[in-house]
Amino acid sequence: QVQLLQSAAEMKNPGASVKLSCEASGYTFTTYPVHWVRQAPGQGLEWMGWIYPGTGDTKYSQIFQARVTFTRDTSASTVYLDLTGLRSEDTAVYYCARTSLGGTDFDHWGQGTLVTVSS
Amino acid sequence: SYVLTQPPSVSVAPEKTAMITCGGNDIGSRSVHWYQQKPGQVPVVVISNDSDRPSGIPERFSGSNSGNTATLTISRVEAGDEADYYCQVWDSSSGVLFGGGTKLTVL
């Protein structure tokens, strides 16, 4: 079955960077876009962007464009999120999610990775 | 930029019908998806493409979309339906957009 397995929780100081991973299994990794969505404590869902593993093409939300980079390793069926210049407002659960084939809805989600930014 | 507006909260008695709206300019021309998120859990799509119900989602969940409002309707509400619900669309310039979310309380 389709699974998206995310890396463990992270604690970072303000100004630091964080790299999260999302390992896909149960489907052809290069065929489906993978998105990153975050959720601050008690807040709603916020889209960060997507990467198409087949080509490495990316699209970033304007909110994060200056600080975020998505990459992928096709040999490991894994996508990565790099977020720089962390601040306390970046404390959130970060999800990777797959869109359905040819669709724009998220049919599978990772379990989420909590990133805590605090001095 | 395009904005999706949801009521912060909706309350409904068990066995009654809950309607959660998602407002947006000419949203009827877009495909709307709805997610249910229970506390501490990952979001789950309950309605895709306005009114499609994924496998495993009860028939009590339905969706509609016309004009400036999309609606998620939950019939015969159960205690287990208590959750946050988010609408979502794709925008060609902004990418993925989520509504602010609606907390459904079952009285």
Image (tube, helix red, strand yellow):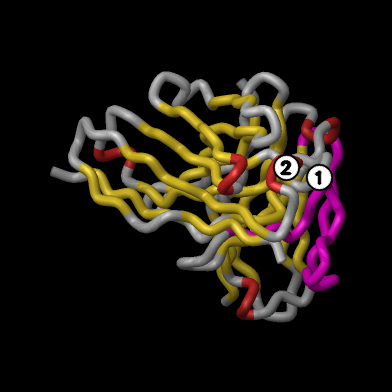
Tag 2 residue: A32
Chain of the residue where label 2 is placed in the rendered structure: A
- Residues marked 1 and 2, same chain: yes
Vertical position of residue A6 compared to residue A46: above or below: below
Q: Quadrant of residue B52?
A: bottom right
Numbered range of the magenta stretch: B43-68
Q: Position of residue A79 (x, y in %)?
A: 54, 42
Residue displayed at 41% across by 34% down: A82
Closer to the camera, A34 or B104? A34
Decide if residue B58 is in sight here. Answer: yes
Residue displayed at 66% across by 33% down: A52
Is most of the magenta stretch helix, strand or loop?
A: loop
Q: Is label 1 in a helix, a strand or a loop?
A: loop
Three-letter amino acid code at disc 2?
Tyr
Along the horizontal axis of the image, is B27 left or right of A89? right
Residue displayed at 41% across by 19% down: A66
Q: Is residue B6 magenta?
A: no
Tag 1 residue: A101
